[in-house]
Amino acid sequence: MKKFLLNKKLAMVVLLFVLAWLRSEALFAQQIRVVATWPALADLTKQIGKELVSVDSLATGVEDAHGVPMKPSFVPRLNRADVLVLIGLDDEMSWLPGLQEVASNPKILPGQKGYIDCSVGVPVAEAAKVLDRAEGDLHPKGNPHYLLDPVYTKIAAQNIAAGLARNFPQHQAIFDKNLKAYLTELDSWIARWDKAAAALKGVKFVEYHQEWVYFANRYGLKRIGAVELKPGIEPTPNHIVSLVQQIKQEKAQMLLYGPQNPRIPQQIGNETGIKVLRLYSSSGGRPETDTYIKWIDYTVRTLVQAVN
Ligand SMILES: [Zn+2]
């Protein structure tokens, strides 16, 4: 009798486990499958979709801003996606369209419901006068690095919420509620960053790739030059010589670079004494910057420390 009871108990435990597993499987199957191009966008989507979404980022955060190396695993991920969240303004043009072609998922093609372009409505800086993509310019539609401005990132978050609601209108109220909560949290950080970044006002800097314009405009830094000749075009030796002169003349304080080879930034640092800082252009580039807010906070703190 005792043995029978024990077996019964065991059977109950097993049954409960099976039920829990089935429930989590069902939840997983129901989740909206989101593929984001960059971790910062994946984080924003997670904040808005919460448990309704499973989010996956193609880039990890350490890649070249315009040249994410393609992995075979990207194709099935894009194929299964319900929605695709991207920076837009042709930021991903050198690697994403080819992948989309082979992923054969009509839902996430440009212009379709599942294609969520976060740049819609962002006031674009450095909007190009002439399209000179032929010369290799990677910013043909203006500067796409608006995520470095937390105020413009609110527009991106709104685009994500609207995009999710467009595809899954039955969850609109939840997306709206989560968006509102996230924007409130972001606003309190923006107020904090405004205070901290007062120390950056008027600071002259040089960037490797032209990606700091939005941050500089928000916090009053002065860009005096770039290592690249044009976005995506490596410098000539002459360009480096004149940049070094300019840094000395203008007493620029910081040289910012990201995923690029540190050789040229360090060489310029040695010749001029300028502070050389590696800061990535998305969250995820460092373990301590795994969310959008942590990334901007790290960026502001690093820059403020550098000028103090
Ligand atoms: Zn760029």
Image (cartoon, rainbow, N blue to C red):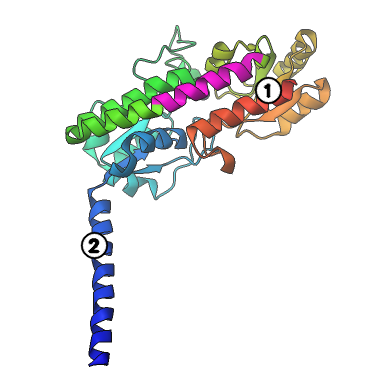
Query: Is 243 rendered above or below residue 167?
Result: above
Mark 2 and ligand 1: say if the CB distance to the nearest ligand atom is below 8 Å. no
Residue 274 among those drawn in magenta: no
Report which quarter residue 101 is drawn in: top left
| Residue ID for mark 1 | 304
As drawn, 30 above or below 90: below
Residue drawn 45% across and 10% down? 127
Magenta region, residue range: 183-198
Q: Image check: 246 left or right of 230?
A: right
Residue most toward the top?
Answer: 129
**How far is disc 1 from disc 2 in space, using C-alphas?**
50 Å
Q: Considering only vertical position in the picture, is 226 above or below 40?
A: above
Q: Position of residue 147 (x, y in %)?
A: 47, 24
Please state which of residues 164 and 206 is positioned toward the viewer in this rendering: 164
Q: Give whichever of 300, 103 is nearer the camera.
A: 300
Residue 162 vs residue 66, the one in the foreground: 162
Q: Position of residue 308 (x, y in %)?
A: 75, 21
Q: Amino acid at mark 1?
A: Val
Give neighbour class at mark 1: few <14, some 14-19, many 20+ (Cα, 10 Å). some
Write down the residue under mark 2: 22
The local secondary structure at tag 1 comes to: helix
Q: Position of residue 91 (x, y in %)?
A: 44, 26
Residue at the far left: name it: 170
Residue 63, horizontal then vertical, whole percent: 53, 37
> Disc 2 residue type?
Leu
Asked if one can make out residue 210 in the rendered structure from this viewpoint, the answer is no
* Residue 197 forms part of the magenta stretch: yes
Task: Write down the quadrant of residue 263 in the picture.
Answer: top right
Q: Residue at x 46, y 18 (%)?
A: 151
**Does 204 sit left or right of 45 as displayed?**
right
Identify the main secondary structure in magenta: helix
Nearer the observer, 248 or 231:
248
